[in-house]
Image (cartoon, grey):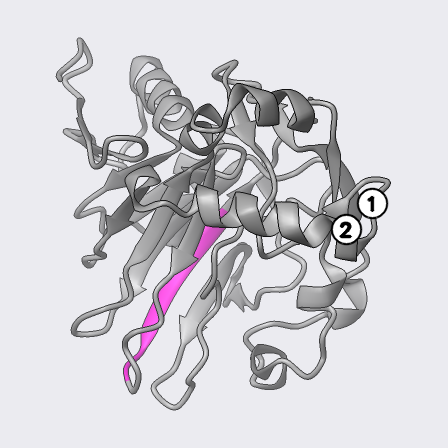
Amino acid sequence: MRNSTSIEVVPTGPAVGAEIRGVDLSAPLAAAEVETIRRTLFDRGVVFFRGQMITPQQHIAFAERFAPINVNRFFKAVPDHPRIAEVRKEPAQTKNIGGGWHTDHSYDQIPALGSVLLARELPESGGDTLFASMYAAWDALSDGLKGTLLGMRAVHSSRHVFGRTDRDEQRDGRLGNAHLATQDAVHPVGIRHPGSGRIALYVNPGFTLRFEGWTEEESRPLLQYLYQHAARPEFQTRFAWQPGSIAFWDNRATWHYAANDYQGERRLMHRITLEGEALG
């Protein structure tokens, strides 16, 4: 479909994702263009752009049209650009960053809105990123389970991920500041998205520990069911990166997963994370 700003919005999957065409992110965006991108992001969970050979300054300027920038505590920063984080894997490294389903910053009291990830260096093949819709995951639950989950909250933490000094990514310098991994937060299991008004499932395998008032052992069976349910293929889209590609995702409405299928090659991405708002 094409709207009055000449931006074309092309869905990439039945439940999640849309490619936005007809916009040059190296130039200042008109207010109508920003609104179209924002509305599509909140509706589709993630938006994609192709062929955007932008500078770090232009990357920052684009991100700031949507929210203030959240400076990441744990990722190595791009030289001379402390507000841009590196997501990097060198040829000799076997583990990547983000190689499992997760939702960034769910461990924060006010989770991040989302991130703007720009491809800088890519392997010959592989290294795709998968996204899953937590709107679709919620909608597909039974009415009985929805009613139960709406009265529940879940505990999220950064400690077991970024606080682990034995991680390869900590030892090789891609991640740091393990002593700052002190974040714990409690959020509703079903959140009402502040931009779309839709309910999204808000637990994830990366950072959710248990349900509030439950032990981890008691929580495990239901969490595992929700994780398996939310990762169903019909809720997903897969993005194949090209030079200058950008993925801008909404952490409140999606999970994502970085495929680690390019051993022996380099992959370098620049990520800007955006401040969010309280969830309810």
Helix, strand or loop status at disc 2: helix
- Residue 58 appears anywhere in the view: no
Helix, strand or loop status at disc 1: loop
The disc labelled 2 sits on which kind of residue? Glu
Secondary structure mostly taken by the magenta-highlighted segment of the chain: strand
For image coordinates 48% across by 33% down, the residue present is 253
Image height of 271 relative to 14, above or below: below
Q: Residues within 10 Å of mark 1 (few under 14, many from 20)?
A: few
Asked if residue 270 is among those painted magenta in the image, a careful observer would answer yes
- Residue holding disc 1: 214
- Residue 8 appears anywhere in the view: yes
Q: Give coordinates of residue 216: x percent, y percent.
A: 78, 55
Q: Is residue 86 left or right of residue 267?
A: right
**Mark identifier at residue 218:** 2
Image height of 114 relative to 180, above or below: above
Q: Give coordinates of residue 96: x percent, y percent.
A: 44, 73
**Residue ranking furthest to the right:** 213
Asked if residue 160 is among those painted magenta in the image, a careful observer would answer no
Q: Nearer the viewer, residue 160 or 65?
A: 160
For image coordinates 39% across by 61% down, the residue present is 258
Q: Is residue 198 left or right of residue 150?
A: left
Q: Quadrant of the N terminus?
A: top left
Q: How many marks?
A: 2
Q: Which residues are magenta?
A: 265-272
Q: Give coordinates of residue 274: x percent, y percent.
A: 55, 39
Image height of 37 relative to 56, above or below: above
Image height of 137 relative to 171, above or below: above
The disc labelled 1 sits on which kind of residue? Trp
Q: Nearer the viewer, residue 70 or 96?
A: 96
Q: Nearer the viewer, residue 276 or 106?
A: 106
Cβ atoms under marks 2 and 1 closer than 8 Å: yes
